[in-house]
Amino acid sequence: MHYKITTIALLASAASAQSFYDVIQKQPTLSLFATIIKTFNETFADILSAASASDTRTILVPNNRAVATYLQKNDIRSATEISAENVRPFLSYHVLMNNVSSEDFLQPGGSIVESTLKDPEFALLKNNAGQVVFGHKASESTEQAKAGAVEVKSGLGDSVKIVESNIQFDNGQFHVVDGLLTLPANCSNTIAHLGAEKLVTYIGRVGLLDALDGTPGATCFAPTDAAIEAALPVLMGLSDAELIDAIKFHILLDPYYTSNLTDGQMLETASIGRSVRVNIVGGQYYFNGVKAITTNDIVRNGVAYVLDGIMPYEFNGIIPTNSTVTTSAAVSTSTIGIGSNSTVTTSASGTVTVTTGSISTSAPTATDEPSAASTARVPGVLLLTAAALTWFLL
Ligand SMILES: *[C@@H]1O[C@H](CO)[C@@H](O)[C@H](O)[C@H]1NC(C)=O
Ligand SMILES: *[C@@H]1O[C@H](CO)[C@@H](O)[C@H](O)[C@H]1NC(C)=O
Ligand SMILES: *[C@@H]1O[C@H](CO)[C@@H](O)[C@H](O)[C@H]1NC(C)=O
Ligand SMILES: *[C@@H]1O[C@H](CO)[C@@H](O)[C@H](O)[C@H]1NC(C)=O
Ligand SMILES: *[C@@H]1O[C@H](CO)[C@@H](O)[C@H](O)[C@H]1NC(C)=O
Ligand SMILES: CC(=O)N[C@H]1CO[C@H](CO)[C@@H](O)[C@@H]1O
């Protein structure tokens, strides 16, 4: 018994003294990735090179099935034919800073881990930091989640799963993943890809695209096309200044991944003087009462969240826990605050409710139950512009 333990310990230390290449070369299911790093060994050695001996690295290694699928999708005949100029950002995104075990990813709210990817085409963060991946426990419903699998999110809302973890080498450890990480795109490209294309059109119309995509380190909240459509009568009536303000209200000037968020936290927005409240209810994230449909979508300059609605300026802090379950994204209500004293609520069915004074309205939900989020007190003056009012009266 004692002898056995000693043998295992010796084997383990022998294995960890091996280079990354020596270790993966011995794993038949990783031969394609081994071929890639052998083909581009100078580039890979450069990416892996550390400033000091104590600098460790964590590598996400796509298995053969993942690499084969990628090659096929991109019409590349073999791993040796990947273009040399594309390979550096791709490889550096798969090499993470420090020695991160798969358990390290499983913090409440997940974990961000910085990668060695610093190419400005894919990483525009404060202090010239490397782009990150976001690791978290895979969603509860899947088989892998039951086994405690770790999911790693990358660009364009894509994610991969860790299928084999904590394999040691001399300078750190690696985890085998079932897909390739996706290089992050601009916020605007990403949210358009994830179903918030209409918002991008508005942002472009008021000339805020460069601000959105070019601010180092940001968070963008992106109401879906359905949410924008539902609020169209209101949006069409906004002046450019009001629209700019509403858009800025959906941007934070730091990247807040869910690992940075706590229930009840207030986040300052790019709309001066206005903040958004975070609620975490049943593992779901809400921003001023609006549910996030996607979280932690890694973008070039930070992170994006796709939202079920447009965030109202005013929020009473209460989340309609149970009605949200029965409300689909398409019919959910969007409430947009116009000025600070009135609120216009629209539903996908076209109902427009204008609330002034301290009247409370109930948002239509699938169950027709009053929705607590929409009962925020909105005292005062109605600041609807003429155009929106005209539409509303028609
Ligand atoms: C890369 O591979 C070539 C050919 O096998 C070898 O001569 C060279 O030393 C290797 N470079 C590094 C950095 O490992
Ligand atoms: C990396 O971390 C693991 C524990 O997760 C540890 O066993 C190993 O020695 C570390 N490797 C290096 C090179 O520091
Ligand atoms: C991202 O946005 C910046 C600033 O607008 C632009 O220069 C760059 O070309 C964009 N990159 C991509 C991949 O679209
Ligand atoms: C988010 O969390 C990371 C890791 O703890 C930290 O370095 C970073 O400063 C936090 N970001 C914000 C905006 O709080
Ligand atoms: C909002 O309404 C309150 C109470 O009716 C009033 O005191 C306040 O001046 C109003 N604010 C604005 C910005 O109109
Ligand atoms: C009235 C009602 O159905 N309440 C439920 C709301 O949802 C929570 C869980 O999210 C349940 O614990 C409550 O019983």
Image (tube, rainbow, N blue to C red):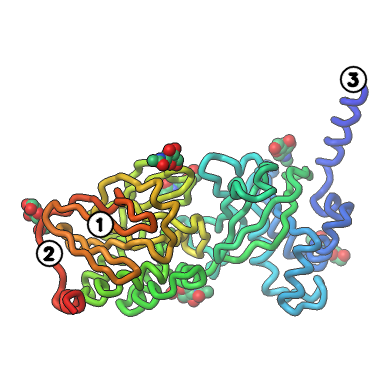
* Mark 3 residue element: helix
Please name which of the two marks, 3 or 1, marks the residue nearer to the observer.
Answer: 1
Q: Is residue 182 left or right of residue 234?
A: right
Specify whether 263 is left or right of 124.
left
Q: Amino acid at mark 1?
A: Tyr
**Image coordinates for residue 111, horizontal then vertical, percent:** 55, 46
Assess whether mark 1 and mark 3 are in contact (beta carbons under 8 angstroms): no
Cα separation between marks 1 and 2: 14 Å
- Up/down of 270 relative to 6, above or below: below
Regarding residue 29, the answer to whether it shows in the image is yes
Q: Are marks 1 and 2 in contact (CB under 8 Å)?
A: no
| Foreground disc of the pair 2, 3 | 2
Disc 2 packing (10 Å; few <14; some 14–19; many ≥20): some
Residue drawn at x 30%, y 77% as measured from the top left: 206
288 to 44, vertically: above or below? above
Gap in Å between the C-alphas at discs 2 and 3? 79 Å
Check disc 3 and give the amino acid type.
Answer: His
Q: Report which residue position mark 2 lands on.
A: 382
Q: Is residue 49 left or right of residue 347?
A: right
Q: Residue pushed farthest front?
A: 367
Closer to the chain start, of discs 3 and 1, is 3
**Percent position of residue 58, x then y:** 69, 49
Residue at image mark 3: 2
Measured Cα–Cα span from mark 3 to mark 1: 66 Å
Quadrant in which the N terminus appears: top right
Pointer 1 residue? 313
